[in-house]
Image (tube, rainbow, N blue to C red):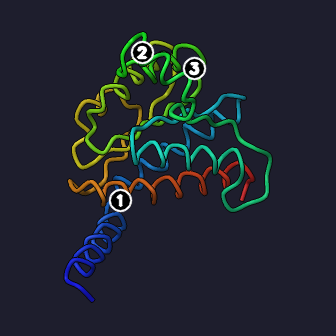
Amino acid sequence: MSTAILTSLAASRQLVIDLEADTALQTRLEQAVDLCVEALSTGKKILFAGNGGSAAEAQHFAAELVGRFLKERSPLAAVALNTDTSALTAIGNDYGFEQVFARQVQAIGQAGDVLVGLSTSGRSKNVVLAFEAAQHKGLQTISLTGRDPRDLGPLSSVTLNMPSDHTPQIQEGHLIMGHLLCGLIEERLLGR
């Protein structure tokens, strides 16, 4: 096997080891689950937002909740804000790309909803502005970031920052956290 493959696999393995050892992160994940379960139990929704690979993960996690993750159940209210190309391009054209998520939060976000923002850098301006809009509307916010949550940290009800500064491992960590979040939400809502 090539050195590049072995190096990449070793980095992924180390990420999982670090996630297993990070009890503070696990506690924050439980807090994030609590926020989502509270929202969904009271007729509210979960909004997701991200750019690039984080947009793909945001869409993935919303789909797991609307469809199902592991258990047969009723659909859960979740929306990925990065999937409506007409809204993204209209808002981006008229107000700037930085506003593409904030405008949607202002339009459909309600007090008690949860906004989950994914940003490997913690600095994605459009996610940061969406979190500011969410705070003004009374939404809870969960950020998934790299080691340093940067701009998103102070705006987050809960921060799930990965123990890495390397984008591929941060995204792998976000995938693990998203799957855990979806699975734990299902367990809690189904009472198992």
Query: In this view of the protein, which residue sits in the foreground, 190 or 129?
Result: 129
Residue 51 position, x and y percent, is: 39, 38
Tell me which corner region of the image, top left, top right, bottom left or bottom right, holds residue 87: top right
Q: Residue shown at 47%/36% (left/top)? A: 116
Above/below status of 10 relative to 90: below
* Labelled disc at residue 11: none
Q: CA distance from mark 2 to mark 1?
A: 43 Å
Tell me which corner region of the image, top left, top right, bottom left or bottom right, holds residue 145: top left
Secondary structure of the residue carrying tag 3 is loop
Which comes before the other along the chain, label 3 or label 2? Answer: 2
Nearest to the eye among marks 3 and 2: give it: 2
Residue 27 position, x and y percent, is: 42, 51
Other-residue count near label 3 (Cα within 10 Å), few / some / many at <14 / 14–19 / ≥20: many
Query: In this view of the protein, which residue sits in the foreground, 92 or 33?
Result: 92
Residue hosting label 3? 109
Which comes before the other along the chain, label 1 or label 3? Answer: 1
Q: Amino acid at mark 2?
A: Asn
Q: Residue shown at 45%/31% (left/top)? A: 141
Residue hosting label 1? 23
Residue 187 position, x and y percent, is: 67, 56
Which comes before the other along the chain, label 2 or label 1? Answer: 1
Residue hosting label 2? 93
Tell me which corner region of the image, top left, top right, bottom left or bottom right, holds residue 112: top right
Q: Hey, which residue is sitting farthest bottom in the picture?
A: 1
Q: CA distance from mark 3 to mark 2?
A: 22 Å
Q: Residue shown at 43%/16% (left/top)? A: 133
Query: In this view of the protein, which residue sits in the foreground, 126 or 1?
Result: 1
The C terminus, quarter of image: bottom right
Q: Amino acid at mark 3?
A: Gly
Secondary structure of the residue carrying tag 2 is helix
Nearest to the eye among marks 2 and 1: give it: 2
